[in-house]
Amino acid sequence: MAIPADYHVHTRLCQHAVGDATDYAAHALRAGLPEIGFSDHSPMPRDGFDDWRMRLDQLDEYVEQVRQARRDYPGLAIKLALETDYLPGHEEWIRDLAARHPWDYLIGSVHYVAESWDLDNPKKISEWNRRDRWEVWTAYFERLTAAAASRLFDIIGHADLCKKFCFYPQQDCAPLFRRFLEAARSSAAVIELNTAGLRKDCREIYPSPLFLQLAAQAGVPITFGSDAHAPEEVGANFAEAMRLARRTGYTHYCRFTQRQRAVEAL
Ligand SMILES: [Zn+2]
Ligand SMILES: [Zn+2]
């Protein structure tokens, strides 16, 4: 049973991860992974937007780090990608970034539900207590749905990130999931099974089993990602993620090369 590619890996350039690309590649080989993809937090149109991403003048250094890892470990397939924040009004910027380097894929993620609130930021957890949970979840999924419909991204990142700190609403969230999945299906976007949720308060892979079941029924394909912020996190909990994928109805996962999708048996 082959381990799938890990398509969500960061580097120290984002200011809250440790290790260079080559350190992550070394660990991937030790862990028996066939392929990894670097998808570090991309720059914003203005540096200083927040403190958890690379600056624009580091983008070339990032690409060079990934190329160096390819030279250091020719036996490992290494993809070049970005995790890009989707915010309304940033579409032109994302197109600009997309044209700068030969990316294998772009992950589109929603962290910001308002201009200055990244809802997964532990430093801003008190914001949750000031707001209605259902309104936050609804706003989050509205943005996520717009991200999928924008066709700017190949993969939508950690699709139910709003559960990170366990601020679950009382309401039935399935309609939010369904609306997003309809947009993902019709714009050919893929979702990821992101095992970082297991390392957070929610102790659950993103997205939830119910969400994945609906996604499988809707015909939305998957990738796998550890969201590694340290080399030893590469491929973390992938056996569990594979079991979850199979249990919810998936038989295949996707790989990307130069933004072209290929399918692998699971
Ligand atoms: Zn991060
Ligand atoms: Zn993210």
Image: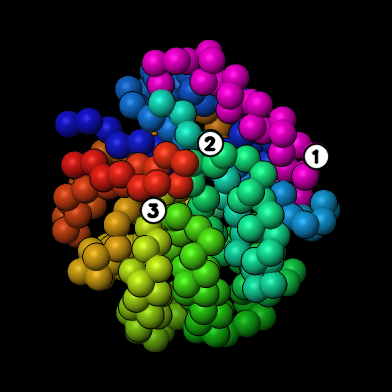
* Three-letter residue code for mark 3: Glu
Residue 97: give its label: none
Give the image's coloring scheme: rainbow
Mark 1 and mark 3 residues within 8 Å of each other at the beta carbon: no
**Could you tell me residue 40's position as x and y percent?**
60, 42
Reply above or below: 190 against 75. below
Between disc 3 and disc 2, whose residue precedes?
2
Asked whether residue 104 is drawn in magenta, I would say no
* Three-letter residue code for mark 1: Asp
Segment colored magenta: 51-76
Residue in the foreground of this view, choosing between 254 and 16: 254
Q: In this rendering, which labeled residue sits more in front, label 3 or label 2?
A: 2
Residue in the foreground of this view, choosing between 184 and 16: 184
Residue 80: give its label: 2
Marks 2/1: CA–CA distance: 17 Å
* Three-letter residue code for mark 2: Leu
Residue 57: give its label: 1
Marks 3/2: CA–CA distance: 17 Å
**Could you tell me residue 44's position as x and y percent?**
74, 55
